Image (cartoon, helix red, strand yellow):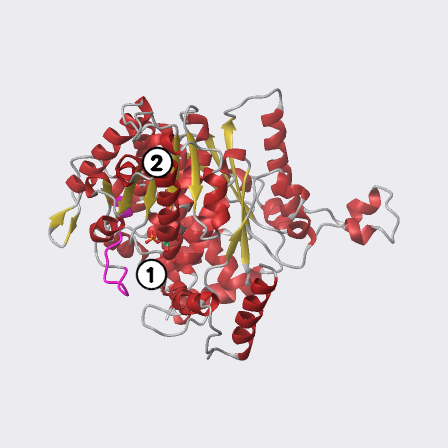
Amino acid sequence: MTNESQAWKNLETHYQKLREVHLRRLFADDPKRGERMTLKAAGLFLDYSKNRVTDETLELLFALAEESRLQERIGAMFTGDKINFTEGRAVLHTALRMPRGSSVTVDGNNVIPEVQAVLDRMTEFADRVRSGAWKGHTGKRIRNVINIGIGGSDLGPVMAYEALRFYSDRNLTFRFVSNVDGTDLAEAVRDLDPAETLFIVSSKTFTTLETITNAKAARAWLVEGLGNNEQAVARHFVAVSTNATEVKKFGIDTSNMFEFWDWVGGRYSMCSAIGLSTMIAIGPDNFRALLRGMHEMDEHFRTAPIARNLPALIGLLGIWYTSFFGAATAAVLPYDQYLKRFPAYLQQLTMESNGKYVTRAGQRVGYDTCPIYWGEPGTNGQHSFYQLIHQGTRLIPCDFIAFAQPLNPVGQQHDLLIANLCAQSEALAFGKTKEEVEAEGTPAWLAPHRVFDGNRPSNTIFAERLAPQSLGKLVALYEHAVFTQGVIWNIDSFDQWGVELGKVLARRIVPELSSPAEPDLSHDSSTNNLIRYYRRLKKETA
Ligand code: F6P
């Protein structure tokens, strides 16, 4: 058990010593701390000096990584061991971004040629859509692309589209439909011409209720809009899936299907064919650059010693706050408007991966695992929830993310943006003492309200500019930080059994809501009552 290991116990003892130590003191004791506690790897720069750690803390965290055999487990992932053992699957999103000519075997089969063949097909298709060579049923070119998917089949594509919008073809409109709430699809198509619209139905399993329901509704919209001609579907629907049988059943020609494999987890799939909308938006060369960025970070993670390993370091710092300080949440604060969906993307990546209370041995963990991830782009968050990060009662470690070059330089605005980032991490770490507040002439009664305790930790990540390659590095950085944490917490980061129960129960409730006759209900009294109340209200307000 992780928390029975010597390294864990040493960290617990060390925590008791360090919990009262202020960052002000750590910085005063080491004037070079801000330069020393930085790490540059694969083109990303991390300042981790504003964390509540000493060199000893880091040594103990590295020892924990060693005791957890992190490096060995990294090797096992990269070589295709079935580390997602509850589902009996390899975990090989890293193979999706390996260069042509590499080799990784799953069940005795080198998967790289298949990966590259799908990328080549995606390239050909994306080029045809972008150039107008791919025509809709009526002969018009495609001007709108709608990705229908949910979870990993939506969040990666929508995040990447928003993040890389600067590089996208502005003659094409991209929309993303995920929610089974009919509003999502209705609003996505309301101003579009079906003759110019292409739907990408993205679903690993092709059985997900939300996606299949939305895809059927989209098909009805399209067929109706094109003279009730079912033949139109072939030119307006493509699929991305691992499940050819279900794709065929849905009515999409499998020659218009882009394949991926069960060894790609949904939340790790934006670099697979699930990225088709991304490739159409930014073009195949830019998509390849995204993959190169990911691969660069993969190689760093695979080969760098733990003490100089960026994802491992970020993962370990997260463990320090979650499992020792008891931090329940972590904020991700990108100072770049294009990264507005990055926190939402990270929520699935982190929480669906590590939101587990059972160890690999099937026992209940004796420590806290994944915190709640949340965030908004700066500076908007500063005028909303930062108050709580500065003066609230909870410890919230923050990751600030920024770029040196703006993509849209407007006057001095980029310097203003970055000044705010630097100011926030400074204020969080050092705060403002009672003495400082009083020295400003603040009356005694007001002073407590204006004091900032500080000692609130943060990481700052800088890259040159937001581009496909740097986005790839950022995504892979967090993927591997999540992996690191899963190894230490000794959980399976690659299954998601926790989402199953709700799905099963919903399937049972659907007919109870829609049956004309009053159903016999056998849920608990609250669920029964909710169902009855909804049925009555629906009828009364129809
Ligand atoms: O409900 C969870 C989940 O299985 C995610 O892990 C996945 O990304 C999402 O549903 C969508 O699944 P699919 O791509 O099979 O439609």
The secondary structure that most of the magenta stretch takes on is: loop
Q: For the point 49% across and 33% down, which residue is it?
A: 191
Q: Tell me where the magenta segment starts and ends, as one range.
A: 84-94
Q: For the point 43% across and 48% down, which residue is it?
A: 178
- Image quadrant holding the C terminus, namely bottom right
| Residue 317 x/y as whole percent | 47, 53
In the displayed structure image, the side of residue 424 where residue 472 appears, left or right: left
Q: Quadrant of residue 236?
A: top left
Residue type, label 1: Asp
Residue 234 appears in the figure:
yes
Q: Observer-nearest residue: 31 or 9?
A: 9
Which of the numbered marks, if any, corresponds to residue 227?
A: 2
| Residue 484 x/y as whole percent | 37, 54
Residue type, label 2: Gly
In the displayed structure image, the side of residue 492 where residue 45 appears, left or right: right
| Residue 393 x/y as whole percent | 67, 59
